[in-house]
Image (cartoon, rainbow, N blue to C red):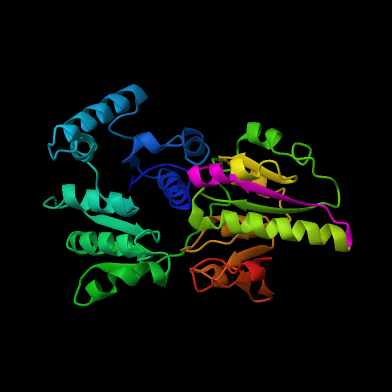
Amino acid sequence: ISITNLETGGAQMFALHLASALAENHAVYLYDQRPEDRNDEFVKNNVSKKVNIISFASNPLLLKVIWKIKRTINQLGFNFNLRDWINDAYLRYVIKKYKIDVVHSHLALSDYTVCRILKTVKLPIVITLHGDLDAADKNDILYASSIIPFIMNRVNAIVYLTHKSIAPFRKYIENTKIDFQNIPNGYNLKSKFSDNNDKESKHFSKEKFNIQDGDFVFGMIGRGIKEKGWEEAIRAFILVKESLWSAHHINAHLILAGDGDFLNTLKKDHSNIPNIHFTGNISSPLKIIKLFDAGLLPSYSECYPISVIEYLLLNKPIIATRVGEIPTMITGYEGEAGIVVNINESGKCNMEELK
């Protein structure tokens, strides 16, 4: 199994859990294309010890040296990416050394790399589309249009989570022998390696956040990027917090669980506001979600978000945007397990509806 990186994210959790399930009956090697981005705690809490995690450099010092040499080469004006050359060479070595029978790739950069280095090698390649090739902006469209034809000429099968994620591939699908399968995201309920961090369980409690009986807790978990709608969640919460107290004397809290440059900037700007709690990165999401009364995901774009599955798993009503498969995910025979908010003309969450 190859993946672009093992930072915190839904695609990463999917790959870790899949690798762990397969490792019960098979030899599984999980290749991390960008070890410099790895969240070790997240990985440890979401993967079986039976899975062999491999990368071209597990030593942080070696990674720094490689990046330094790469920058020097670039400054000298040579068009040579040392880091990627080493990664490609090592991945070829791993495939040959461990006599790999099939490669399953996750995320676009990994898909492209695997297809490129195995262009002339007769080895089955399967990719799972997690929505990162959706043409959301001009740069995405250019990137997708440049690598999709190359991928289509090499892969044997493509798994897609949603019909939206297959959209960039549609014009290449006709007259192809590639096997396409729609398989939605899932969650391993019997997993021994998810949600098992006792340190976090003790660290994240109602007492930790000064949450009293009768308080209402909104919560959100995800990657700390702007597109997840963190800023909208904060703005809506500030308005709702005031109205809940004035109208019903209900004290409200907002727990924001995630890490990233954008979210860290928001933390600096809003850390002085009472009852908004920034937890940083979470290795075991279910531990913090247990504190929520409602789960938020006012994202601009989604595919089949695992955070929504986790909210549902713990019976938390959901407030999320009408993107990807979210409306279908929260709809059951007995009705909807939450509220779906529309996207406005600028492509962002409708603030009035969210409030």
Q: Position of residue 66 (x, y in %)?
A: 25, 28
265 falls in the magenta region: yes
Give left or right: position of 214 versus 102: right
- 198 w.r.t. 328: above or below: above
Is residue 139 placed above or below 21 in the rendered structure? below
Question: Residue at horizontal 57%, vertical 48%?
Answer: 190
Given residues 208 and 231, the one toward you in this image is 231
Is residue 109 within the magenta segment? Answer: no
Vertical comparison of 40 with 106: above or below = above
Taking the image as drawn, is residue 243 in sight? yes
Q: Where are the magenta residues, as a range?
A: 248-266
Which residue occupies 54% across, 50% down? 222
| Rendering quarter of residue 74 | top left
- Residue at x 51% of width, y 59% of height: 305
Q: How far across and how far down the image is residue 100, in percent?
A: 24, 43
Which residue does the image show at 65% across and 45% down from the upper left? 270
Pick the front one: 52 or 238: 238
Q: Quadrant of residue 73?
A: top left
Q: Furthest-top residue in view?
A: 61
Viewer can see residue 315: no
Please tell me which residue lies in front, 304 or 76.
76
